[in-house]
Amino acid sequence: MATQSFDLKARLANRREPFLFSWMTIPSPQLAGQLARLPIEGVCLDMQHGTIGFSDAAPMIAAISSAGRPAIARILWNEPGLIGQVLDAGAAAVIVPMVNSKEQAEAAVKAAKYPPLGGRSWGGYTAFQTYGLSPADYLKKANSITQVFAMIETQAALDAVEEIAAVPGLDGLFVGPSDLSIALSKGAGIDKTAKHTLDAMKLIAAAAAKNNLVAGAFAGSADVIDTYAAMGYTFMAGAVDVDLLQAGAESLIKAVKGV
Ligand code: 3PY
Ligand code: MG
């Protein structure tokens, strides 16, 4: 297995150029390796809303890491076992959905970081290989080479964002603008660039900046990436695998049939 050469923490410390990654819903190591070879800097596995289970994710993380890109996992829920599992499989970052309070953010950090920052359980056999580190060196470096993001995507999370952002050991906040806009509109609609969504995202970016955290968000298309980047977001999901396939198919049909 080729070792992970990408230093995600150092890359994210450079806030001048947004770090863009693709977002996978399809369980396929081949497709993961293919996306990791595009000029986009990382690949995220959506294990919450995609159909990627852990036995799919493990070879996908290996394929992405072998291409020299960081593998990111948006896990199913804020559960310590699910967090440890993807980090042990070699993920460079874990995005934890629906973190609604300081206590829930503390629980995510506890599962993701070894002492003294947290209480992650030991056994990253695949991660040692991914990073080319001895177990002793992995223990020394893991808290820095792996990143944990708390998703802010509810009214409760927005109300608690200052406290969540101040939790020691958290590396970043990650906005789920679909859930956030559904919550803020009381179910009226999904709008990633509505005024209420962008106003909330300004507060979230400010809380991240105040605590020297990375501000991340699911964008999903070029115009949304530009809007969020202008607000200080530097870690963004750029496009979803199924949308990329659809766009490729549509452009082929257009080229052939002119429609
Ligand atoms: C959201 O927008 O709610 C997400 O979780 C990202 O897909
Ligand atoms: Mg969501």
Image (cartoon, rainbow, N blue to C red):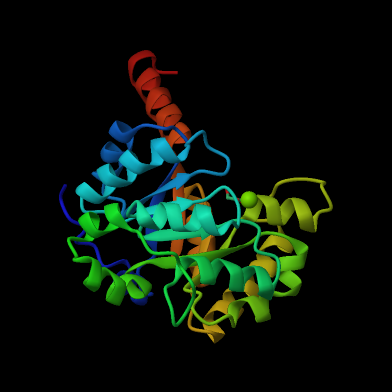
**Is there any visible trace of residue 218 in the rendered image?**
no
Location of residue 106 in the rendering, given as x and y in whole percent from the top left corner: 60, 74
Residue 94 on image: x %, y %: 46, 59
Please determine whether, in this image, residue 110 is positioned above or below residue 178.
below
Left or right of residue 49, residue 27 in this image: left
Identify which residue, 154 or 193, lies in the foreground: 154
Q: Along the horizontal axis of the image, is 40 left or right of 186?
A: left
Which residue appears at 41% of the width and 37% of the height?
55
- Residue placed farthest to the front in the image? 122
From what the image shows, is residue 193 above or below residue 135? above
Q: Is residue 181 left or right of residue 165?
A: right
Q: Position of residue 172 (x, y in %)?
A: 50, 71
Question: Is residue 140 in sight in this rendering?
Answer: yes
In the image: residue 4, left or right of residue 53: left
Is 50 located above or below residue 117 in the figure?
Answer: above
**Looking at this view, is 15 or 29 the one in front?**
29
Q: Position of residue 39 (x, y in %)?
A: 26, 49
Question: Quarter of the image containing the C terminus?
Answer: top left
**Figure label count:** 0
Which of 126/102 is in front? 126
At 53% across and 84% down in the image, what residue appears? Answer: 211
Which residue does the image show at 57% across and 44% down from the upper left?
48
Q: Residue furthest top?
A: 257
Q: Residue furthest bottom?
A: 210
